[in-house]
Image (cartoon, coloured by chain):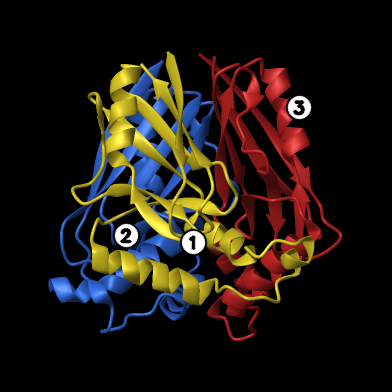
Chain colours: A blue, B red, C yellow
Amino acid sequence: MTTYTEYLWFNTDKRRDLIRITPSLEAILGKSGVREGLMLVSAMHITAGIIVNDDEQGLHRDIMGWIERVAPADPSYEHHRTGEDNGDAHLKRILVHHQAILPITEGRLDLGPWEQCFYAEFDGRRRKRVVVKIMGE
Amino acid sequence: MTTYTEYLWFNTDKRRDLIRITPSLEAILGKSGVREGLMLVSAMHITAGIIVNDDEQGLHRDIMGWIERVAPADPSYEHHRTGEDNGDAHLKRILVHHQAILPITEGRLDLGPWEQCFYAEFDGRRRKRVVVKIMGE
Amino acid sequence: MTTYTEYLWFNTDKRRDLIRITPSLEAILGKSGVREGLMLVSAMHITAGIIVNDDEQGLHRDIMGWIERVAPADPSYEHHRTGEDNGDAHLKRILVHHQAILPITEGRLDLGPWEQCFYAEFDGRRRKRVVVKIMGE
C-alpha cells in the first residue's frame, strides 16, 4: 500500500472564487505512482470548500449566486462579535461540503466526462491550503 | 490490499427520482471479497447525487420537495445560454453532495439500522453512471 | 494495511446540539497505531450529521440558526404521517452531509489550524451512533 500527501496553496485576488484544480490533482497523482486507489481533496481552512461539477463560466456564476442566496453575507451573525466578518463563508463551506474523494483507476482520476474538481474560496485574499492525500497501490 | 471497481448505469423514466441502490452495492461488495475497508459511491454525471437516508416514501417526497425549494428550477440561470435547461440540477447535486463512503466491516456494509443508499437523479431520461470503488482487504 | 473500527455513542440532553469529537477521534487514532491513512467519521442515524468547522460558540449558534432557516421544522412533512415528527432532521442531515474523511499524516489527524470535527445532532435525547473507520498503515 502506498500513501502520498501534498498540499495546494491558494491566495485568491477576489474574496470569492472557483478555481479548477483537476490539472494539479492529476500532476500529484502522477508523482504518487498509484494506479488503483482513492484521492482525498479537502479544504483545510473553514471558509473554503471543494466542488466537483461542470467547467462552464455561466454555471459558475449561477453556483456562486445560489450559494449567496442560500447562505448570505449578513452583518448580524454572532460570529462577528469575535471581530470576524466572514460568518457567511463558514456556512457556505458547510453548504457545498469541504471535501471530495476522487477514485483512481488504471493510473488516472476516474471522473465522469464533465466532472472537474474546483477549489471554492469564500473568504480569500490570504494564503490557504488544501490537503491532497492518495491511498492505493 | 484489494481494490475493486464497478459502474452502475441508470436511465430513469422520470426527470427526477430517488433510486435505492443498497442491494446493488451489497452485490458488488460480495464480488470484491473485501472484509474490511471502504466503498466509494460517486455519481459521475454533474446533475445527480448520492443520499444516505431512510427508505420511506413520504420522506422521499419531503426530500425532493425540499431540494426543489432550496435549489429551484429557474429559466434565468446563465448556464441555460449554452442551450441547457438543467442549471437547477447542477445546484441540487451540490446541495445533497455527489458521493458517499460506506464502511465495510466483517464483510458487510456497516450501515445504521435505517441507513439506505440512494441514487438521486435530477436530470434523467438518459444513460448516466455511478462509480463504485472498494478498497480494503 | 491496517483497518480499525470503533463506534461513538451519543445521547444528547437537547434535541439539537453540536458536540466536538476531535479528542475522541484522536484517541481512536492512537489505539489504531496507523501513521498514514484515512479516517471515515459517519453518523449512522439518519437524523444526525458530521461538520468540520471552527470551534466558536457564536458561530455554532449561527450554524444551527442557518440550518433551521434552510431546512425548517414543519408539521406538514409527509414523513410525519408515519407517526414521526422529525422530518426536518432528515433534511438537516442532507444539508450538512452525514460524514467526513479526516486524513492521517505522520500519526496525527492532518487538520487545518481551526478545523474541529463535530457531531451534529438534529433529533437527540436517545442513543445514537457514529462509526469511525481507519484504513492505513
Asked whether, in this view, residue C114 is left or right of residue A116, the answer is left
Q: Secondary structure at mark 2?
A: strand
SS for callout 3: helix
Output the chain of dot 2: A
- Which one is in front in this view, the residue at disc 3 or the one at disc 1? 3
Q: Is residue C82 above or below residue C7?
A: below
> Quick one: SS at disc 1?
loop
Quadrant housing residue B130: top right
Check disc 1 and report the residue beneath it. Answer: A55
Subunit under mark 3: B
Q: Which residue is mark 2?
A: A48
Image vertical order of residue B1 relative to residue A19, above or below: above
Would you call the spot at circle 1 few (<14 residues within 10 Å), some (14-19), or many (20 or more)? some
- Density class for disc 2 (Cα within 10 Å; few <14, some 14-19, many ≥20) is many
* Badge 3 vs badge 1, beta-carbon distance below 8 Å: no
Furthest residue to the right? B13
The quarter in which the C terminus of chain A is drawn is: top left
Residue marked by disc 3: B27
> Where in the figure is residue A95, as x and y percent of width and height?
45, 64
Q: Looking at the figure, which quarter contains the N terminus of chain A?
A: top left
Q: Are marks 3 and 2 on the same chain?
A: no
- Foreground label between 2 and 1: 2
Callout 2 touching callout 1 (CB < 8 Å): no
Q: Please state which amino acid type lies under the numbered disc 2.
A: Ala
Residue C115 versus residue C57: which sits nearer the camera?
C57
Residue A42 x, y percent position in the rendering: 35, 46
Depth order, front residue of A43/B46: A43
